[in-house]
Image (cartoon, helix red, strand yellow):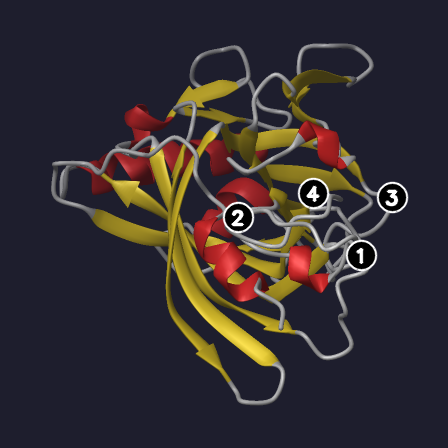
C-alpha cells in the first residue's frame, strides 16, 4: 500500500513563521485553484529504515523519500495555481480592484510555491526546479522584466505572479511571468483531519503561514516608495499571509512509477491587519490611491 498521504503531513520541514502577538484580523485575499504535487526522490527507499527491495515503486513514495513539493495549475502543468483576488467590498474597493483590475473570472494571476523537503536526496536523480522573482521594469522604455533567481540559492519560495497570456482558467502552459507582486521565502505548514473514503481517495486539511518580504511589488506603478514597491506596513498589513484548504488525492491507477502524487483542491489565501482597528483606514487610503492612479 502506498504511504503518500502520510508523506504530505511531514513534507514541509522548513523555517517556521512566528505568530503575531498582536490581535489578528484576517481578510480573504483570494483563492488559488489547482493543487500541490509531491515529488519523490528517484531512489529505492522503502520507509523509516530505508531498506531497498530492488525496485523503485509506490512503496518508495513515503515520508522518508520526499524530494520537494510544488503548487501547480494541474498534475501535468507546472505553471502556478490559478489565482482570483477576492471581490468582496472592503469599503469602496476590493482586492481584485487593487491588484488585478480584471473582471472576476478573468484574472491573469497565479500562486506558485516550491519547497525542498528535509528528506531531499541529491543522489536521487531529482533536481529542484528553478524559480525567479520577476520585477516589472516600470521605469524602462521597453517594459522589460528583471528576473532574480530565488531557487537556487533558497530551498523554499512562494509568490503571487502576474502572467502574460493568462486566461479565465488560470496561467496555463506556456504563460510568461510578468511580475511577482507579493513574495517570500519562508513557509510553515500544518496538516490535520486525514480521511480515506474506503476506496481510493484521501483528503487532508491544511493551513500555513507565508512570510513575505514586507513589500508589494507593483506591475506598472511606482508605488509609494517610488521604486515600484509599497511597504505592507504603510497599509497596516502584516508581513505574514495565511493559506488554508482541503486537498484530495486519488490513488486509483497510480502505481508509483512516476514518483509523484497529485493533491487537487482550492486554497484560500488571507492577509492580516495588525494591529486593529486603526489600520482599516490605512488600508483603504492606500488601496484607493492605487485605483485612482490606474484610472
Asked if 2 appears above or below 222 in the picture, the reply is below
In the rendering, which numbered label is found on residue 49? 2
Q: Position of residue 259 (x, y in %)?
A: 74, 54
- Tell me the residue that label 4 is attached to: 41
Q: Answer with mark 1 or mark 4, whichever residue precedes in sequence.
A: 4
Residue at mark 2 to residue at mark 3: CA–CA distance: 41 Å
- Say which element carries label 2: loop
- Say which element carries label 1: loop
- Tell me the residue that label 3 is attached to: 174
Residue at mark 3 to residue at mark 1: CA–CA distance: 23 Å
Residue drawn where x is 50% and y is 50% of the image: 48
- Say which element carries label 3: loop
As rendered, which of 4 and 249 lies closer to the eye? 4
Displayed quadrant of residue 18: top left
Asked if 238 appears above or below 135 in the picture, the reply is below
Residue at mark 1 to residue at mark 4: CA–CA distance: 10 Å
- Tell me the residue that label 1 is attached to: 258
Residue 281 in the figure: left or right of residue 247: left
Q: Answer with mark 3 or mark 1, whichever residue precedes in sequence.
A: 3
Residue drawn where x is 64% and y is 33% of the image: 121
Amino acid at each position: 500500500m502506498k504511504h503518500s498521504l502520510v508523506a504530505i503531513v511531514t513534507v514541509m520541514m522548513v523555517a517556521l513563521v512566528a505568530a503575531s502577538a498582536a490581535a489578528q484580523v484576517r481578510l480573504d485575499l483570494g483563492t488559488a485553484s489547482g493543487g500541490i504535487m509531491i515529488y519523490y526522490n528517484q531512489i529505492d527507499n522503502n520507509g523509516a529504515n530505508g531498506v531497498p527491495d530492488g525496485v523503485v515503486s509506490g512503496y518508495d513514495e513515503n515520508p522518508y523519500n520526499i524530494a520537494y513539493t510544488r503548487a501547480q495549475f494541474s498534475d501535468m502543468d507546472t505553471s502556478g495555481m490559478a489565482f482570483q483576488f477576492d471581490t468582496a467590498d472592503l469599503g469602496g474597493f476590493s482586492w481584485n480592484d487593487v491588484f488585478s483590475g480584471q473582471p472576476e473570472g478573468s484574472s491573469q494571476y497565479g500562486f506558485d510555491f516550491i519547497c525542498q523537503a528535509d528528506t531531499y536526496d541529491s543522489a536521487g536523480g531529482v533536481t529542484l526546479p528553478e524559480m525567479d522573482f520577476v520585477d516589472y521594469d516600470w521605469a524602462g522604455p521597453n517594459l522589460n522584466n528583471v528576473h532574480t533567481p530565488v531557487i537556487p540559492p533558497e530551498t523554499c519560495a512562494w509568490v503571487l505572479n502576474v502572467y502574460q497570456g493568462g486566461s479565465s482558467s488560470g496561467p496555463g502552459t506556456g504563460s510568461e511571468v510578468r511580475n511577482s507582486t507579493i513574495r517570500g521565502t519562508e513557509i510553515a505548514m500544518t496538516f490535520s483531519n486525514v480521511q480515506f473514503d474506503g476506496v481510493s481517495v484521501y483528503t487532508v486539511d491544511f493551513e500555513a503561514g507565508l512570510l513575505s518580504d514586507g513589500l508589494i511589488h507593483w506591475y506598472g506603478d511606482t508605488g509609494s516608495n517610488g521604486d515600484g514597491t509599497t511597504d505592507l506596513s504603510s497599509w497596516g498589513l502584516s508581513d505574514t499571509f495565511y493559506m488554508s484548504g482541503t486537498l484530495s488525492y486519488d490513488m486509483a491507477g497510480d502505481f508509483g512509477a512516476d514518483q509523484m502524487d497529485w493533491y487537487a483542491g482550492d486554497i484560500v489565501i488571507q492577509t492580516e491587519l495588525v494591529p486593529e482597528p486603526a489600520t482599516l483606514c490605512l488600508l483603504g487610503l492606500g488601496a484607493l490611491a492605487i485605483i485612482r492612479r490606474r484610472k
